[in-house]
C-alpha cells in the first residue's frame, strides 16, 4: 500500500496501459482520477476500482485541450487539495509511411503526444508545488530512445520530444521536490496491438526484436510507473526507463 492517502491523476486511463496503471495505483491505496476521452472505458475502470475497495473519480477531457486541463486540475484541488502523482499516459499513433503522411495527422499526433504532456506538466506542477512536491511519470516509448523501424516517423519524433521534456522539467523543478521520469515500453500486448499484429509475420517481426522473446504486458508497464512514482525512487529523477525486454540493449 505504497500510495495510501495519495492523489493520483492518470490520463488515457480508459483502456490499455492507462487502465492498468489506474488499477495498480488503486490497489495500493491511492485515490485515482481516471481521465480520458473514452467515457465508457473510464467509467468502467473507476467502477472496478470502487468495487475492489478503492476510490476513483472520472474526468473526461482531451489532453490536447488546455481549458480541459485547467478545469481538471481545478477540480482536483477543490476536491483533494493536492496532487501527488501525475501519469501522462495518453497517446496516439497514425501508422503510415512518411511520404504518405497527411499534415493533419502529423499535427494530431503531436497535439496528443507532445502538447498533452506539456500541458499536463504545466498545470499540475503549480498544484504539486503548493502541496510540497510530487512525482510525474511520462509514458514515452522505445521510439523515444531509438529510431524504431516499425513505427511512424511522427510518432518517433513525438516520443523523442517527451523524453527530452521529461529531462528538462526534472532538472528545472528538482529543487521544488518534484521528480519527473519517463518509461519507454516496447510493443505492449493490448487489444489495439492485437489488431495491428493479426498477421503472424508482423507478430514474428516484433517478437524477433525483443531478446526476452515476448511482448510487454500492460502490467509490466504499470509496475515500472508505480516504482518511479513511489518513495522507493526518491533519488531517481530525469531517468528514461526502458520496459522493452532488452530491445534497446542491442
Image (cartoon, helix red, strand yellow):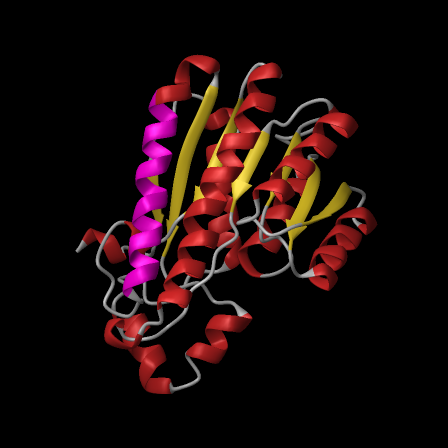
Q: Residue furthest left?
A: 250
x 81%, y 47%: residue: 50
Relative image position of residue 150 (x, y in whole percent): 28, 70
Q: Quadrant of the C terminus?
A: bottom left
Q: Quadrant of the N terminus?
A: top right
Relative image position of residue 159 (x, y in whole percent): 35, 51
How many numbered dots are placed on residues in this image? Answer: 0
Q: Nearer the viewer, residue 216 or 163?
A: 163
Asked whether residue 243 appears in the rendered view, the answer is no
x 54%, y 18%: residue: 133
Q: Is residue 162 magenta?
A: yes
129 relative to 192, above or below: above
Relative image position of residue 116 (x, y in whole percent): 49, 46
Residue stretch rendered in magenta on the structure: 153-171
Q: Nearer the viewer, residue 69 or 247?
A: 69
x 41%, y 20%: residue: 173
133 relative to 40, above or below: above
Magenta residues: mostly which secondary structure? helix
Relative image position of residue 161 (x, y in whole percent): 32, 45
Q: Is residue 176 magenta?
A: no
Q: Quadrant of residue 85?
A: top right
192 relative to 38, above or below: below
Q: Nearer the viewer, residue 23 or 84?
A: 84
x 77%, y 54%: residue: 48
Left or right placement of residue 218 versus residue 30 in this view: left
Left or right placement of residue 205 versus residue 139 in this view: left
28 relative to 236, above or below: below
Asked whether residue 58 appears in the rendered view, the answer is yes
Amino acid at each position: 500500500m505504497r500510495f495510501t492517502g495519495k492523489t493520483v491523476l492518470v490520463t488515457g486511463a480508459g483502456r490499455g496501459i492507462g487502465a492498468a496503471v489506474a488499477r495498480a495505483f488503486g490497489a495500493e491505496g491511492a485515490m485515482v482520477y481516471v481521465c480520458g476521452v473514452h467515457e465508457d472505458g473510464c467509467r468502467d475502470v473507476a467502477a472496478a476500482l470502487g468495487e475492489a475497495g478503492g476510490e476513483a473519480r472520472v474526468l473526461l477531457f482531451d489532453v490536447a485541450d488546455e481549458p480541459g486541463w485547467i478545469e481538471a486540475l481545478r477540480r482536483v484541488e477543490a476536491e483533494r487539495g493536492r496532487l501527488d502523482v501525475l501519469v501522462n499516459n495518453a497517446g496516439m499513433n497514425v501508422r503510415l509511411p512518411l511520404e504518405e503522411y497527411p499534415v493533419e495527422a502529423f499535427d494530431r499526433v503531436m497535439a496528443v503526444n507532445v502538447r498533452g504532456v506539456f500541458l499536463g506538466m504545466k498545470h499540475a506542477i503549480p498544484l504539486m508545488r503548493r502541496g510540497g512536491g510530487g512525482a510525474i511519470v511520462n509514458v514515452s516509448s522505445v521510439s523515444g530512445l531509438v529510431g524504431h523501424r516499425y513505427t511512424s516517423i511522427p510518432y518517433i519524433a513525438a516520443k523523442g520530444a517527451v523524453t527530452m521534456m521529461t529531462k528538462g522539467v526534472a532538472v528545472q523543478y528538482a529543487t521544488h521536490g518534484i521528480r519527473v521520469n519517463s518509461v519507454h515500453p516496447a510493443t505492449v500486448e493490448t487489444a489495439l496491438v492485437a489488431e495491428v499484429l493479426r498477421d503472424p509475420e508482423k507478430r514474428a517481426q516484433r517478437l524477433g526484436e525483443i531478446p526476452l522473446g515476448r511482448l510487454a504486458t500492460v502490467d509490466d508497464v504499470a509496475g515500472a510507473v508505480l516504482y518511479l512514482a513511489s518513495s522507493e525512487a526518491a533519488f531517481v529523477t530525469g531517468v528514461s526507463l526502458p520496459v522493452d525486454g532488452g530491445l534497446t540493449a542491442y
